[in-house]
């Protein structure tokens, strides 16, 4: 039977697809290329289309025995979600509704869902635990939280079991250097810093240095994309062996400031990487760090690429090999 990966041409999805292929799983990818890249899909059977298009979902489910779905397809820009919530409700919430209805119709009972730390909003404490309050401060987080709730009711009604993984800051790239992070527009710290190192941007803007942190810049929990993918494999195995529906945080458990990221990138790349202090970015909490104790104890997950140097080195390898991302390939 096959695993359907929605959003499998995107940053995290493409790493998932590669890992599944390496494990000799039968993989089907559905991606509308809104953010994804054809060149990022290193195998499997690719369908170009939208999760909201029931005809393409029917075609996939009718013609393939799908065992489980790993669902990445979504819009994921916090800022954009604040000016265009419709896009987020449509892509993320309505899109997942279409997917779940198709799963129900075709009797597919397992889903691993890509959720986010943005479901928590401003944290009540760090490290953040799954039992902490979820009060999203942006429409993106709100739609992901709404999907988590929808999953719960589809489990109750239709016995569709889910594992929702709340990612903190996914980062780094595959060790092969073949796939990596390429967003248009790019808004994430590490790829932007590396674009400065490559000479594609003149400087990195630091969004605020007056936060209540050790150096005044925001602290985030950066998790290597391959460690993140490993957690999905464990989640899939858990569902395969009759596991119950669960929600887990996924983070490194260590926080790094914006200045620490830039400093480490200077060491890794050997480039100066000029930086300039700017105004705070709207809606950025000062510190976001995950407690991943629950997934560690229940699924035996152990992140192994936890050093910041390692994460940035892997991203740098991708950027050096693919200075234009997937575009010129
Ligand atoms: N930052 C800068 N300059 C930049 C870009 C980012 O200083 O040019 C700072 C941000 O202010 C933030 C940190 O670097 O403090 C990390 O920013 P990212 O945009 O890389 O990541 P976020 O923490 O904002 O967002 C990530 C995911 C979101 C998710 C969120 C959860 O990308 O999808 O974590 O809170 F919603």
Image: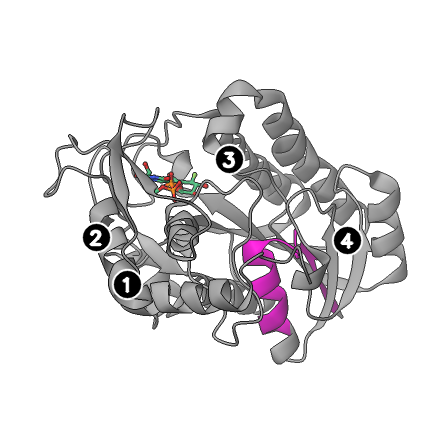
Q: Residues within 10 Å of mark 2 (few under 14, many from 20)?
A: some
Q: Which mark is residue 260?
A: 2
Point out residue 79 in the picture as x, y percentages from the top left corner: 47, 28
> What SS does tag 2 mark?
helix
Judge from the rendering whether residue 67 lies leftward or rightward of residue 313; answer left or right.
right
Q: Which of the marked residues, 3 or 2, is nearer the chain's N terminus?
A: 3
Q: Which residue is mark 4?
A: 107
**Front-most of residues 122 and 211:** 211
Q: Is mark 3 within 8 Å of ligand 1?
A: yes
**Marks 2 and 1 in Cβ contact (< 8 Å):** yes
Visible residue check, residue 83: yes
Residue at point 53%, 60% (across, down) = 323
State which image quarter holds ligand 1. top left
Q: Which of the marked residues, 4 or 3, is nearer the chain's N terminus?
A: 3
**Quarter of the image that includes the N terminus:** bottom right
- Which quadrant would residue 116 be assigned to in this image? top left
Q: Residues within 10 Å of mark 4 (few under 14, many from 20)?
A: some
> What SS does tag 4 mark?
loop
Distance, label 1 to label 3, CA atoms, is: 23 Å
Q: Which residue is mark 3?
A: 77
Given this view, does label 4 or label 1 mark the residue nearer the observer? 1
Point out residue 130 in the picture as x, y percentages from the top left corner: 34, 44
The boundaries of the magenta stretch are: 2-20
Residue at point 49%, 22% (across, down) = 82
Given this view, does label 2 or label 1 mark the residue nearer the observer? 2
Q: Which residue is mark 1?
A: 308
- Which quadrant would residue 124 be assigned to in this image? top left
**How was the colour assigned to the protein in this rendering?**
one colour
Point out residue 132 in the picture as x, y percentages from the top left corner: 29, 37
**Marks 4 and 3 in Cβ contact (< 8 Å):** no
Up-down: is 236 above or below 273?
Answer: below
């Amino acid at each position: 039977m096959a695993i359907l990966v929605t959003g499998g041409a995107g940053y995290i999805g493409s790493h998932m697809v590669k890992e599944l292929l390496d494990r000799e799983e039968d993989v089907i990818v559905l991606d509308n290329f809104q953010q994804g890249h054809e060149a990022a899909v290193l195998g499997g059977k690719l369908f170009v289309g939208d999760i909201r298009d029931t005809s393409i979902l029917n075609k996939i489910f009718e013609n393939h025995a799908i065992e489980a779905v790993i669902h990445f397809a979504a819009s994921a820009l916090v800022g954009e979600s604040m000016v265009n919530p419709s896009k987020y409700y449509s892509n993320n919430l309505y899109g997942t509704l279409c997917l779940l209805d198709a799963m129900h119709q075709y009797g597919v009972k397992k889903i691993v869902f890509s959720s986010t730390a943005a479901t928590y909003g401003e944290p009540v404490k760090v490290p953040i635990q799954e039992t902490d309050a979820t009060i999203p401060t942006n429409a993106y987080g709100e739609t992901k939280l709404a999907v988590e709730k929808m999953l719960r009711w589809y489990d109750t009604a239709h016995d569709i079991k889910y594992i929702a993984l709340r990612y903190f800051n996914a980062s780094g790239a595959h060790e092969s250097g073949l796939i990596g992070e390429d967003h248009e527009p790019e808004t994430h710290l590490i790829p932007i810093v590396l674009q400065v190192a490559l000479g594609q941007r003149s400087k990195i803007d630091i969004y605020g240095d007056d936060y209540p942190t050790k150096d005044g810049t925001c602290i985030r929990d950066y998790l290597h994309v391959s460690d993140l993918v490993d957690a999905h494999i464990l989640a899939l195995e858990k569902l395969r062996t009759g596991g119950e529906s669960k929600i887990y945080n996924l983070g490194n458990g260590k926080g790094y400031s914006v200045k620490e990221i830039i400093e480490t990138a200077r060491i890794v790349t050997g480039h100066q990487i000029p930086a300039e202090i700017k105004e705070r970015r709207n809606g950025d909490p000062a510190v976001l760090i995950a407690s991943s104790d629950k997934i560690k104890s229940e699924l035996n997950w152990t992140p192994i690429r936890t050093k910041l140097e390692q994460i940035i080195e892997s991203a740098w390898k991708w950027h050096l090999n693919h200075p234009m991302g997937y575009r010129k390939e």
